[in-house]
Amino acid sequence: MSASGQSTTPDAAQSGLHAPPPPIPQVSGELITTRRVGAYHHLTFVAPGVAELARPGQFVALAVGGDTSANLLRRCFSIHKVSPSGTYGGTVDVVVAARGPGTRWLTDLSPHDEVNLIGPLGRGFPLPTEPVPCVLVGGGYGSAPLFWLAAELRERGCHVEMVLGAATMDRLFGVVEARRAADGVTVTTDDGSMGVRGWVSTVLPDVISRSGAEVVYGCGPMAMLRSVTEIATAQGAVAQVAVEESMACGIGVCMTCVMPVTDKDGVTRMARSCVEGPVFRGDRIRWDAFEDGRCRVPEDAYGAASMGGH
Amino acid sequence: MSGMAEVTATGVRGRPDVNGATDLASEGAIKDASDSASDLSIDMSVDLAGMALPNPVMTASGCAANGRELHRFFDIAQLGAFVTKTVMANPRSGRGTPRMAETPSGMLNSIGLQGPGIVEFARNDLVWLKSVGARVLVSIAGNTAVEFADVATALRESPAFDAVVGVEVNISCPNVANRGLVFACDPLASAKVIALVRERLPRNIPIFAKLSPDVTDIVEIARACVKAGADGLTMINTLLGMVIDTELLRPQVAGVTGGLSGPGIRPVAVRAIWQVSAAMTEGRFRTVPIIGVGGVRTGDDALQLVAAGASGIQVGTATFNDPSAPMRVSGELAAALQDKGFARFVDAVGIAHTRLGQR
């Protein structure tokens, strides 16, 4: 497999008594810019220590509502980009869709407001060791981490194609940036308001075969990641997808963000998407377990047999 | 730092009989305290039924996994004790998702006790906890009273057992042998579990029964557990709750109901600790230490539970908001007590019971 790459965030949490993993920064991040981008908000925080460590595909967990907030759970966002040494010191950018009280609080912030920020968290996208062609697929603002990934891939000599899809034009994120970041860009919208009318899956088979892609990276809604995985696998490419699952803590202690993932020994476990993901090989995710906004535990999953009574 | 050091989530802050200096003037001191509690001269040590701890603050079971994750935020050996995720006999996948819903000042969870099982726990997690020098309070459970006892036996026989300072018996799970009725809702079933676990563990390892608040009379359950040999009590477990997703008009968590936790349930914890503490003082049963847990986010929150009768404190859901919360709460509690003139933590335990006349 060409995308086996280096491990981007060694997480010795799973590897017993090896060298201890490094501390994770927790900082009070000052918001320096906030701007609307279509249906989304693009926020830049000063986050010393976070930017320097971050890799594409990793995320940050933001506390919302201030110190006495009744919304205790952190909101997790894929890192859009980092600037380790800008005017303000290290900065971290995220893209937020205001959907609930926590995200609305974030998008209502003004410059100089502070947000408690933890990161970088999770395992990022593995990079190919050879300069193979790659396709990067983003659904809605799921495209946020892909531009940074594209830059790293091109630095390694990879040909990079991007496919951006959304329901409508205002829900696309980063079309202009994509044209700078990638060698080729294909846009789809459900309503045809921009690019090809249809889904990313409408155009993806052709983009893969045209570019000879060996790795397909995806970030977006679970249903899209499933079809990206199916299409990539059918064409002999490896899918690496950053999953979307609601998290309470983002750091691996709450056990809420799990999904069934098969390991290299063929055993399916309920893996935490925050520390074992958010990037998984697409063909390792048990897509058959997802249905109607829920995910059940496959009967053959490790430990499923002892779940009677609870 | 987290910037959370000055949080006071309760309304107690403005109460006239509380020394105003604790609020804003001492903010700096509280922050310093969370960075280096050693600056404080107050003696925070406590002996919980033979479990000698340098300070009373612990993680809460199920809110800290088994230590490795939080160890990237602070040294877990600095905690009074590290409380593990409840371990049962066999590996468990846990339930499907969604597993949680956010609630006002808290959350509802339905994880299903996902875990490695006692064999893997003993071989891997406990060995690691010992390697970093943590004092470990192991939370155990079973589908039957016998399974509880078997887990205790396997724990006792594990190679890193010397890292274990106590065992917390999570009796808030369904008893398969009695139509799934939760052990902690039945004094007889609770007593049976406690008696079986007690006889499987060495005398120098105290066992704490973790009680559910979802009972008519928590004093009755506490009494049954203490009479059966519990060396202490942990109060409270989550409250059974439910959230409906109003977009889909169906239960939000896959398990339908779930455990409610967080600052929203703190008054229930304070009440339960108060009632059981009062019953012990009245001599209704033997006095044993109470570990208070439920909605602690700040040192001031912890102080409420302490004043109601808790001599240990666990920080649970707040850890999801602030991974360093257990250490921060420890520092804030020490600073708050010192500020109020206490020389020793233990002198504040249950103090509110002596001040009823001052209402």
Image (tube, grey):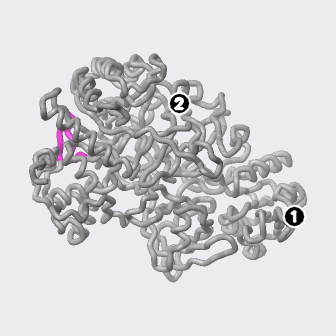
Residue highlighted by disc 1: A197
Q: Quadrant of the C terminus of chain B?
A: bottom left
Q: Residue at x 43, y 29 (%)?
A: B173
Query: Measured along the vertical axis of the image, is residue B289 above or below residue B74?
Result: above
Check the residue under mark 1 and report the chain it is in. Answer: A
Q: Amino acid at mark 1?
A: Arg
Q: Residues within 10 Å of mark 1 (few under 14, many from 20)?
A: some
Q: Is residue B258 magenta?
A: no
A216 with respect to A9 (left or right): right
Residues at discs 2 and 1 in contact (Cβ within 8 Å): no
Label disc, if present, on residue B305 of the rendered structure? none
* Residue B158 spot, x, y in % from top left: 37, 26
B315 with respect to B340 (left or right): right
B339 with respect to A95 (left or right): left
**Circle 1 sits in a helix, a strand or a loop, which is it?**
strand
* Residue B54 spot, x, y in % from top left: 20, 46
Q: Amino acid at mark 2?
A: Arg
* Residue B152 spot, x, y in % from top left: 36, 23
Residue highlighted by disc 2: B92
Quarter of the rendering containing residue A147: bottom right
Q: Quadrant of the N terminus of chain B?
A: bottom left
Residue B205 visible in the picture:
no
Residue B234 visible in the picture:
yes
Query: Which sits in the foreground, A62 or B41?
Result: A62
Q: Which residues are magenta?
A: B45-56
Quarter of the rendering containing residue B167: top left
Q: Residue at x 45, y 48 (%)?
A: B69
